[in-house]
Amino acid sequence: MADLTSPADAQRIQQWLDEHRITEVECLIPDMAGQARGKIVPRHKYNPAVGLRLPEAVLAMTVTGDYPEKDFTSVADPDMLLKPDPNTLRPVPWAKEPTAQIIHYCFAFDGTPFALSPRNVLRRVLKLYEDEGWKPVVAPEMEFYLVQVEPNEDIPLKPPVGRTKRTEAGMQSFSMDAINEYDDIFDVMYDWCEAEGIQLDTLIHEMGTAQMEINIDHGDPLPLADQVFLFKRTIREVAIRHEMYATFMAKPMQGQPGSAMHIHQSVVGIDGGQNIFSKPDGEPSEAFFHYIGGLQTYLPAATAFFAPYVNSYRRLSRFTSAPINLSWGYDNRTCGLRVPHSGPQDRRVENRLAGVDVNPYLAIAASLACGYLGMKQGLKPSEPLKGSAYEQPHQLPRHLDDAIEKLMGCAPLVDLFGEHFIQTYSAIKETEYREFFDVISPWERRFLLLHV
């Protein structure tokens, strides 16, 4: 088989490694949970023209490292071929020795993209847009908590101590002083992200105690998903070095708001770059309304990509600044789909469904897939909501088991993502749900042990 990396790309990678005096290379792929998997290779043994190998089964693991009962990879447990993406070559800012990190594509040995790779799934959806002469533009907003280090998982999480040697009192939405409590962490975060080419925009303090939100500049979906993937890894490392945890659980603490990854999205024409959500006179286009119609129609079946764990559904509850339905409205944050104020060229839809615990490749792919189906099928949305969507009925699955059932029963999404991928992803989530269901919680022991 011919090399999957062009000689020019291989030379470009080698030159960068030489210029930065790299001694080790972290060869990364995102798994189903969005975690970094791969190998660390000595610089002198890394050949980007050849790539490297990793077992296919890495992409069929649950978040606990287990596997579904049914084997969705080959029974021979073969390798897949990893090809470096030269556009993802970055330093590892926290490494003691000069170290590079590079995200790899996953291929079968016949050169076809490996179907279980979340990165390939996103590329598959983007190809659909390209075939129509369209290019999606996205901008993710990530919320996360800083918490005290607590190795014992049976003890509830607590907010960390800041520079004043105190924990936060109450909720400090948009507080500058509350952000300044953790200046040392954020100074390092910005420095490391700049070194990695992660295009950070706004940092704010969110509603929760020591809950932050970081925005990334809008751009092409695949590089943006890469940046989310790398940012999570980076801020965790920064926090640990400051004796804290950064957590991306959707609902890490009782009584506190959940954490979301809102996805702003628009579509431009490949020729000319005009926003297809706006007509020449500046008014909303039919494509804009069809896109919203597609999100409203298909997001319930795609919920397992936006709420991928049992914990995710604790966030999706009424009056908690999280959506419970897919009403849409102009600048209405109670809706699952919000259209911010903007000019015609910046007209976009904000999908507020995703928790920050998502795999960014799959969440972005799913949102774009739903909008694509809406435009192709000419789906019409409901009327925009002017009141509170929290007063409207639930429209989303209430737990992971229900979400998986809806996903597997949605033929258009199965077709877009590929049947093999959907079956594997669903089996992974069913296994995780079963593992969770085996655990007896403190609530059950407290209220049921001697009272029923």
Image (tube, grey):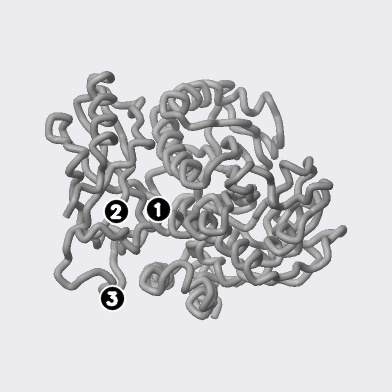
- Whichever of labels 2 and 1 marks the residue nearer the N terminus, that label is 2
Q: Which of 399 and 281 is in front in this view?
A: 281
Which residue is found at the position 25% from the left and 24% from the top?
15
Name the disc covering residue 119, or none: 1
Give x and y (percent) for residue 208.
Answer: 64, 43
Q: Is mark 2 on a helix, strand or loop?
A: strand
Is the C terminus in the top left, top right, bottom left or bottom right quadrant? bottom right
Q: Determine crowd level at label 3: few under 14, some 14-19, many 20+ residues with C-alpha closer than 10 A.
A: few
Q: Is residue 99 above or below residue 356?
A: above
Is the N terminus in the top left, top right, bottom left or bottom right quadrant? bottom left
Three-letter code for the amino acid on which mark 2 is drawn: Cys
Can you identify the residue that label 3 sits on? 69
Which residue is found at the position 62% from the left and 27% from the top?
179
Asked if the residue under mark 1 is in contact with the one under mark 3, i.e. CB atoms within 8 Å, the reply is no
186 displayed left or right of 26: right
Give x and y (percent) for residue 230.
Answer: 42, 39
Asked if the residue under mark 1 is in contact with the one under mark 2, i.e. CB atoms within 8 Å, the reply is yes
